[in-house]
Amino acid sequence: MSRLDSFIRRLEAQRRCLEFAAGLVEGLEGPVFELGLGNGRTFDHLREICPEREIFVFERRVQANPDCIPEPDYLFEGPIAETLPLAIERFARAVPLIHADLGSGRPEIDRATSALLAGLLPDLMRPGGIVLSDQDLPWPAAAGVELPADVAPGRYFMLRAP
Ligand SMILES: C[S@@+](CC[C@H](N)C(=O)[O-])C[C@H]1O[C@@H](n2cnc3c(N)ncnc32)[C@H](O)[C@@H]1O
C-alpha cells in the first residue's frame, strides 16, 4: 500500500470512528472533549456531527487553521497534565465523549501521555461514556468497544467508561 493510500485510510478510519462514537453517546448528556487540536481537522468534524454539544478543546500550543480555533471559553491551552485536572473540577464524571488524538509518533512519550490520561479518565467520564483514542489506554476497568467493521484493528481504540 502506498503512503498516500495509508494516509487516506487513516483519515477515513478517523472519520468513521468519530461518527460511530458520536452515535453511541446520543442518549448521554454533556460536552465533548477534543484532546489534541493539531490543525483542527477532527475538531471541525466534531462540530459538524455534534452541533448540539459544547466542545472543549485541549491543546499544548494552538497552531490550527484559523477557521478551526475554538472560542477562548472553549479552549484549554497548555499540557493536559495541567489543564485536564482543572477541567475535572468543572466536569467531574460528566463527559460522555472524549476524542484523544495526542500521538506524537514517539512511543515513549505516547506511553507516558496515555498513562497520564488513563489516570484522569475515571474522574472525567460520565458512566457509559466513550473514549476514542489514537493510542491504547491502560484503563482496565473500562470495557473495550469493537471498532466499526471497516476500520483496521489498531488504528483506533475505543473504551466505554464503567
Ligand atoms: C496528531 S495532532 C492532533 C491532530 C488533530 N486531531 C487534527 O485532526 O488536526 C496531536 C496534537 O496533540 C497535542 N498534544 C500532544 N500532547 C499533548 C499534551 N500532553 N497536552 C496538550 N496537547 C498535546 C500536540 O500539540 C498536537 O497538536
Image: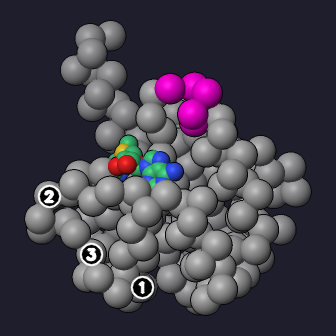
Q: Residue at x 39, y 60 (%)?
A: 59
Three-letter code for the amino acid on which mark 1 is drawn: Arg
Query: Mark 1, mark 2: which one is toward the viewer?
Result: 2
Mark 1 or mark 2: name the one nearer the start of the chain.
1
Residue 29 place in picture, x, y as percent: 59, 89
The magenta region covers 106-110
* Contact (Cβ within 8 Å) of mark 2 with mark 3: no
* Residue carrying label 2: 65
Q: Is residue 146 visible?
A: no
Question: How many marks do you count on the picture?
Answer: 3
Marks 1 and 2, how far apart in space? 21 Å
Q: Nearer the viewer, residue 150 or 30?
A: 30
Type of residue at label 2? Answer: Asn
Return the residue nearer the eye: 83 or 36: 83
Answer left or right for 105 relative to 91. Answer: left
**Magenta region, main secondary structure:** helix
Q: Position of residue 144 (x, y in %)?
A: 75, 49
Within 10 angstroms of label 3, few (less than 14), some, or many (20 or more) residues? some
Provide the residue designation for mark 1: 53
The secondary structure type at the circle numbered 1 is: loop
- Mark identifier at residue 70: 3
Q: CA distance from mark 3 to mark 1?
A: 13 Å
Residue at 78%, 68% (x, y): give it. Answer: 122
| Mark nearer the viewer, 3 or 1 | 3
Mark pair 2, 3: CA separation: 11 Å
Picture coordinates of residue 148, whole percent (x, y): 54, 46
User: What's the amino acid at mark 3?
Assistant: Pro
Query: Which mark is first along the chain, 1 or 3?
Result: 1
Locate residue 100 relative to residue 61 in the image: left or right. right
